[in-house]
Amino acid sequence: LRLGVLASGRGTNLQAMIDSTKRGDLEAQVAVVVVDQPEAQARERARQAGIPEFFVDYGAFPDRESAERRIISILERHEVELVCLAGFMRILTPVFLNAYKNRVMNIHPSLLPAFPGIGAQRQALEHGVRYTGCTVHFVDQAVDAGPIIMQAVVPVHHDDTVESLSERILEQEHCIYLEAIQLYLEGRLELEGRRVRIHPEKF
Ligand code: GRF
């Protein structure tokens, strides 16, 4: 399965994908990486792994849709089958989502629908929840919504900071993102309206 990864920053989820595909644990390959920030560390991770990477400067386009068309053309050129958002800090318009209908995944550092948007870990701490976690979901028009594929629960400790909690969540992110991709490539995910059914084998 050919993956296209969209990122804006650090790229640890990207790194987890790269490592797992190189080890052969995940029967996929990261075909291309696209970033919207010139300084994104994800670029260096791609380069280190010999993966083509592209910076798409949204500011250089008249509107979001035009920037997305540029991204789509890069993904198409690299024959991407599944798009993985990994810390990509932009909202996709219907132009992109229709081009990759039901083929865009995202990871979010909370148990959605709790704490959508930015600062999910801080929101969890402020709310005082005992457990939070992370969610891999298919992307649709709404922000941090879309059919849920995988979730992992992470405990909140009384002395947690945003950093310590984020780190504990991140460890789980790296696991469930890979698991979700593996289920997808095994053809085991079926969309049933808002819900995703996980089949025991390819259906
Ligand atoms: C992760 O916490 C992810 O859940 C959120 O953005 C962060 C990206 O981290 N969407 P990284 O760039 O993969 O290290």
Image (cartoon, rainbow, N blue to C red):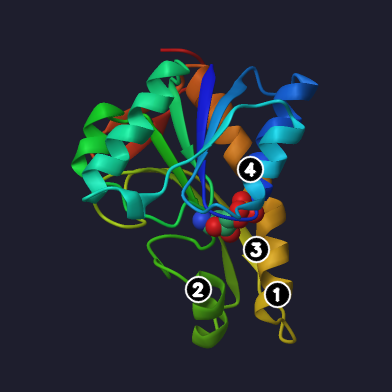
Q: Earlier in the sequence, mark 1 or mark 3?
A: 3
Label 1 near ligand 1 (CB < 8 Å): no
Q: Earlier in the sequence, mark 4 or mark 1?
A: 4
Q: Is residue 96 left or right of residue 182?
A: left
Task: Kindly report the distance in space between the C-alpha atoms of the residues bearing marks 4 and 1.
Answer: 23 Å
Q: Amino acid at mark 4?
A: Arg
Quarter placement of the C terminus? top left
Task: Kindly report the distance in space between the C-alpha atoms of the residues bearing marks 1 and 2.
Answer: 11 Å
Q: Which residue is mark 1?
A: 163
Q: Are marks 2 and 3 in contact (CB under 8 Å)?
A: no
Q: Residue at x 72, y 79 (%)?
A: 157
Label 3 near ligand 1 (CB < 8 Å): no
Q: Which residue is mark 2?
A: 119
Quarter placement of the N terminus? top right
Helix, strand or loop at mark 4: helix
Q: Amino acid at mark 2?
A: Gly
Q: Residue at x 66, y 34 (%)?
A: 17
Task: Kindly report the distance in space between the C-alpha atoms of the residues bearing marks 1 and 3.
Answer: 14 Å
Q: Which residue is mark 4?
A: 43
Q: Amino acid at mark 3?
A: Val
